[in-house]
């Protein structure tokens, strides 16, 4: 059974394309609108690890949800309900900080005033199954699925495979090098919050070419966060979708 829930998210994302100066303010948009600064392909394919988004610009944006890599691929940026979780790999473990410091190579983000809660079906162990169900539930909820939309997943996950980017040299960057700088982290039976951005049209912009969703997760205790490579939700996670200001129907 679905219900409208106020999840402290009243923000407006920005539809930015291409490189953006690091000192540019974070553009605003409509509530629930997905926006981005910089592009994933510029980082992975072109090797541009420049910090294009000054994270201090995010600090005063209440109810912001965002995801991206830190400048130089030195970690991951996750923002949940206006609170930062910057994850780095240090001395063989994940270290997180809550300060809006540094810059991101690219950032995808949204501000959402109200969310609709829905229970996920059990047995969603494959990424394709999860993405398909998110799309279906969004369509049923009246979310405009012909454009990017944000979503949340909350609860105890059966298994989450994350990575933390940890580039330690100045070697030229490319897709092969990108795979090498990912430090894997596996969480099992942990309570997590997941922020995701879904689109079938933005591969290379803010999604990978083999996925329609860019997701970051953080544990309930705040000690671990990072980029989601694979998520098996089990039967205890719930999906939250934005209540569309301009619904499809």
Image (cartoon, grey):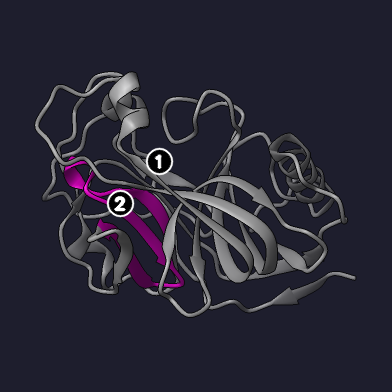
Residue closer to the observer: 42 or 114: 42
- Asked which secondary structure carries label 1, the reply is loop
Where residue 181 sits in the image (x, y, percent)?
30, 37
Task: Please report the residue visible at 59 percent of the width from the left and 31 percent of the height from the top.
Answer: 211
Residue range of the region highlighted in magenta in the rendering: 65-89
Q: Which mark is residue 15?
A: 1
Report which residue position mark 2 lands on.
Answer: 27
Give me the C-alpha separation between circle 2 and circle 1: 8 Å
Q: Which mark is residue 60?
A: none
Q: Are marks 2 and 1 in contact (CB under 8 Å)?
A: yes
- Looking at the image, tell me whether mark 2 or mark 1 is earlier in sequence order: 1
Q: Quadrant of the N terminus?
A: bottom right
Question: In the rendered image, which quarter is residue 49 located in?
Answer: top left
Task: Please report the residue visible at 27 percent of the width from the left and 54 percent of the height from the top.
Answer: 26
Q: Main SS of the magenta segment?
A: strand
Task: Please report the residue visible at 68 percent of the width from the left and 63 percent of the height from the top.
Answer: 157
The stretch drawn in magenta includes residue 74: yes
């Amino acid at each position: 059974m679905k219900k409208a829930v106020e999840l402290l998210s009243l923000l407006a994302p920005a539809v930015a394309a291409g490189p953006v100066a690091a000192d540019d303010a974070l553009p605003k948009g409509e509530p629930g609108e997905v926006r981005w600064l910089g592009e994933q392909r510029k980082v992975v394919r072109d090797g541009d690890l420049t910090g294009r988004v000054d994270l201090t610009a995010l600090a005063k944006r209440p109810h912001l949800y965002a995801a991206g890599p830190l400048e130089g691929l030195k970690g991951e940026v996750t923002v949940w309900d206006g609170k930062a979780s910057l994850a780095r790999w240090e001395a063989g473990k994940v270290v997180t900080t809550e300060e809006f410091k540094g810059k991101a190579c690219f950032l995808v983000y949204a501000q959402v005033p109200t969310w609709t809660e829905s229970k996920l079906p059990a047995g969603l162990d494959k990424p394709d199954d999860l993405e398909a169900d998110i799309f279906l539930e969004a369509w049923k909820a009246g979310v405009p699925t012909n454009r990017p939309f944000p979503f949340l997943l909350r609860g105890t996950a059966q298994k989450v495979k994350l990575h933390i980017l940890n580039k330690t040299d100045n070697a030229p960057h490319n897709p092969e090098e990108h795979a090498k700088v990912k430090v894997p982290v596996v969480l099992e039976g942990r309570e997590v919050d997941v922020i995701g951005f879904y689109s079938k049209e933005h591969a290379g912009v803010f999604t990978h070419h083999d996925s329609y969703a860019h997701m970051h997760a953080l544990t309930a205790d705040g000690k671990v966060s990072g980029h989601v490579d694979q998520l098996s939700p089990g039967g205890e996670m719930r999906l939250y979708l934005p209540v569309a200001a301009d619904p499809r129907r």
